[in-house]
Amino acid sequence: MSRKPYLREVPKTTWFLRQPRYMRYMAREVTCIFIFAYTFLLICALGSLADGPDAFQEFLNSLRSPWGVLFNLAVLVVTAYHSLSWFVVTPQAMPIQRGEEFVPGNIIVNAHYGAWAVVSLIILIWGM
Amino acid sequence: MSERQIQLEVLRYNPETDSAPRFQTYAVPCLNEWVVLDALNYVKENLDPTLSYRWSCHMAVCGSCGMMINGEPKLGCKAFIHEYGDSIRVEPLAHFPIERDLVTVVEDFIAKLASVKPYLIPREDQPISAGEFKQTPAELMKFKQYTLCINCMLCYAACPQYGLVPEFVGPAALALAHRYNQDSRDGGRDQRQEVVASDEGVWECSFVGACSEVCPKHVDPAGALQQIKVASTIDWYKEHLMPWVKK
Amino acid sequence: MAKSNKPIFWGLFAAGGTVTAFVTPALVLITLFAAFGAGMDMFTYEAIHAFAAWWLGKLIILGVILLSLWHAAHRLRVTAHDFGIRADTVVAYVVYGLAALGTLMTIVYLLRI
């Protein structure tokens, strides 16, 4: 009896189109592109801040355009998805054991949502 | 008891005669209480005795009957007919070479299980006279979840990284390493790190989480792998920033 | 199989992911506000410059930007692989190089403030 195992190939670039859970994973992963871009925007803001009030005003003016609005809107949606997907897996990565019981996952996740709201409020109040 | 006619579309492959797999459809009168495994057994007993597949306990504890059912890794004995429409597609578990029909080649998986040293390695050799290990219920709970793995390989079929990078040690094997690392009786974590903390070990994982979603025993291998990453990262910083600290 | 050097990048990825999860959406709301041209008197140069000139302000800015950079860089490295780009070493140099560039720029700008 001869063996001739057959290996089904996995397409390297389109494998994630095959299942909704893979699509959700890729959506989560590509948030990094937006975060990368936004961070460089912040670095530009920092640079203009270092160059003086006129440069800073120029930077603010450059933000005030349809592209500025669209970019920030897109980043807002994307980073919110990053935050949600990050918090929801925290109980898996860092389980908290108290005696024989584990702290229920949704308590950990909700605590993160609460902290997220508080931190966001602090930043918004400071920033504006 | 109600009956439904199901079209079972099964991927066939005979290594002695076929150059590639092909689908074959069987018309199976199924009782609504049946599982897909029952439908396969009906085919083998009444329609086509050449159909090959693994199964044993028929109650989701042996891990033998893993297969792709409508593209989803499932145990054949746990996939209820009433969950599906009138046509069901059955294929061998993804990411494994096909031996014959629904039987896959599992040698790679077995080798990877063995490579993580899945046995207790005590911190010190103790004579029998020292007595038994003592373990509190809390110490048991620290690793008990990871003992529930039935080696069904559904997680390997779900894991896209294993599909793309076959060298990846994989969810079940790494969760098994974690089971021993977390066991208070064990002192072998350093010995396992060579495999566990390699590029093909836990670092190939990108936390897709599909493994935990498909696990029929709720082992949560994805969680185990993230916990290994955290521990390995802390180790790395300790080693490099405080090399004088003995482990 | 040798032990990987991934831990250093993954550690930054995890820390950065946590920081960006908590902090970035609120920051984006602020820049979105600015993009709408709303209340330009809110973004006074003096106030923001004062924060960046404060030693703790510098540390916070440095921390947030650095961790965001290295989080995004490591995830981008993995994502490139997921999209089928197999030249991992090249990708690593590119993404970590970008992060290093951003890090350098941040340090230079903060020193000038």
Image: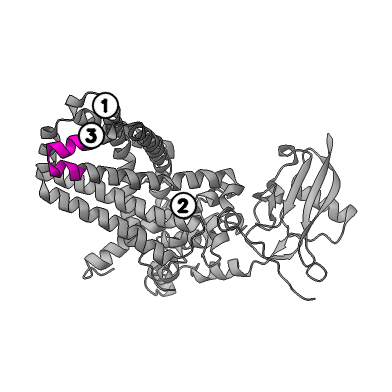
* Residue closer to the observer: B158 or B247: B158
Magenta residues (range)? A46-58
Furthest residue in direction top, as rendered: C39
Q: Are marks 2 and 1 on the same chain?
A: no
Separation of marks 2 and 1 at Cα, in angstroms:
40 Å
Inspect the image, locate mark 3, and give the three-letter code of the amino acid beneath it: Leu
Assign the magenta stretch its main secondary structure.
Answer: helix
Q: Position of residue C100 (x, y in %)?
A: 27, 58
Determine which residue is flagged by label 3.
A60
Measured along the vertical axis of the image, is residue A24 above or below residue C9?
above
Q: Residues within 10 Å of mark 1 (few under 14, many from 20)?
A: some
Q: Which mark is residue C37?
A: 1
Inspect the image, locate mark 1, and give the three-letter code of the amino acid beneath it: Gly
- Disc 3 element: helix
Inspect the image, locate mark 2, and give the three-letter code of the amino acid beneath it: Phe
Q: Position of residue B15 (x, y in %)?
A: 78, 69
Confirm whether the magenta stretch covers residue C83.
Answer: no
Subunit under mark 3: A
- Disc 2 element: loop
Q: Is residue B187 left or right of residue B164?
A: left
What residue is rendered at 75% in x and 41% in y? B81
* Residue closer to the observer: B58 or B175: B175
Measured along the vertical axis of the image, is residue B75 above or below residue C21?
below
Residue A101 sits in which quadrant? top left
Determine which residue is flagged by label 2.
B207
Q: Residues within 10 Å of mark 2 (few under 14, many from 20)?
A: many
Q: Is residue B189 left or right of residue A5?
A: left
Confirm whether the magenta stretch covers residue A51.
Answer: yes
Q: Residues within 10 Å of mark 3 (few under 14, many from 20)?
A: many
Q: Is residue B190 visible?
A: yes
